[in-house]
């Protein structure tokens, strides 16, 4: 099977519902940003030395494919959503588990650290962008009910896991320094 179809050569794409839309529509931008997020998480995985975090991130990559499938279907509803609501609870447990092992967060920190930690911070910012696009999309079109909570929790997970992998590597967090007047 060839990877190219030539169907998109005129700037349109097909949604999972079969509907043809311009590639610039918000729904396509939203699931395209989730795809970008998934690629950045793959970079974090490539640099991750902790097997537990790496395993969690691989599961998240799979979840993001489900989320993208839901976004690519303009007819996704509670009944046919691929992304399952219990994944939000699983994400919360991972955040809580990592947080228990970390020193308390007392200040804003800079998004730097190990290569894995830095990629996780980059993924966090792209996740927030995806979330903003999805919120905008949801204002005008139906989306699956798990998508927004999942993305919101995922950005928190990515922040916490960045802190966690940096902590495990002995990297000291760098606090943001408020400029002096």
Image (cartoon, helix red, strand yellow):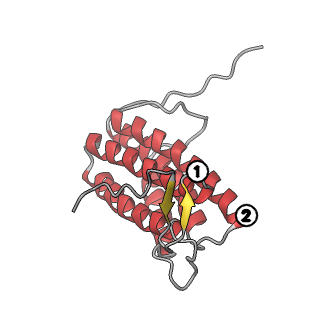
Which one is earlier in the sequence, the residue at label 2 or at label 1? 1
Please identify the quadrant where the N terminus is shown. Answer: bottom left
Locate residue 28, reporting x and y percent. 54, 57
Q: Residue at x 29, y 58 (%)?
A: 55
Between circles 2 and 1, the one closer to the viewer is 1
Q: Is residue 45 above or below residue 97?
A: above
Residue 50 coordinates in the image, percent (x, y): 27, 48
Q: Is residue 82 left or right of residue 43?
A: right
Q: Quadrant of residue 175?
A: top right
- Relative to 93, residue 37 above or below: above
Residue furthest to the left in view is: 1
Residue 72 seen in render: yes
The residue lying at 40 percent from left, 39 percent from top is 119
- For residue 64, above or below residue 155: below
Residue 139 - label: 2
In the image, 75 versus 119, the foreground residue is: 75
Indicate the position of residue 138 as horizontal and vertical percent values.
67, 65
| Most foreground residue, 101 or 5 | 5
Q: Which residue is under mark 1?
A: 24
Element marked by disc 1: loop
Real-space CA distance between mark 2 and mark 1, rounded to the nearest whole angstrom: 17 Å
Give the residue at the far bottom of this rendering. Answer: 79
Compare residues 101 and 138 and report the one nearer the observer: 138
Q: Secondary structure at mark 2?
A: helix
Question: Is residue 104 visible from the viewing direction of this image?
Answer: no
113 left or right of 92 in image: left
């Amino acid at each position: 099977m060839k990877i190219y179809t030539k169907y998109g050569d005129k700037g349109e794409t097909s949604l999972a519902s079969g509907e043809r839309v311009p590639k610039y529509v918000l729904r396509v931008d939203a699931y395209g940003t989730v795809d970008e997020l998934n690629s950045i998480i793959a970079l974090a995985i490539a640099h991750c030395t902790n097997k537990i975090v790496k395993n969690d991130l691989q599961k998240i990559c799979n979840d993001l494919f489900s989320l993208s499938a839901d976004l690519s279907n303009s007819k996704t509803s509670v009944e046919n959503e691929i992304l399952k609501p219990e994944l939000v609870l699983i994400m919360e447990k991972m955040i809580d588990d990592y947080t228990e092992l970390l020193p308390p967060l007392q200040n804003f920190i800079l998004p730097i650290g190990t290569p894995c930690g830095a990629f996780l911070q980059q993924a966090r910012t792209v996740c927030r962008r995806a979330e903003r696009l999805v919120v905008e999309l949801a204002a005008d079109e139906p989306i699956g009910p798990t998508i927004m909570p999942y993305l919101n929790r995922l950005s928190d997970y990515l922040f916490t896991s960045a802190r966690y992998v940096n902590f495990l590597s002995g990297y000291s967090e760098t606090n943001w320094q408020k400029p002096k007047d």
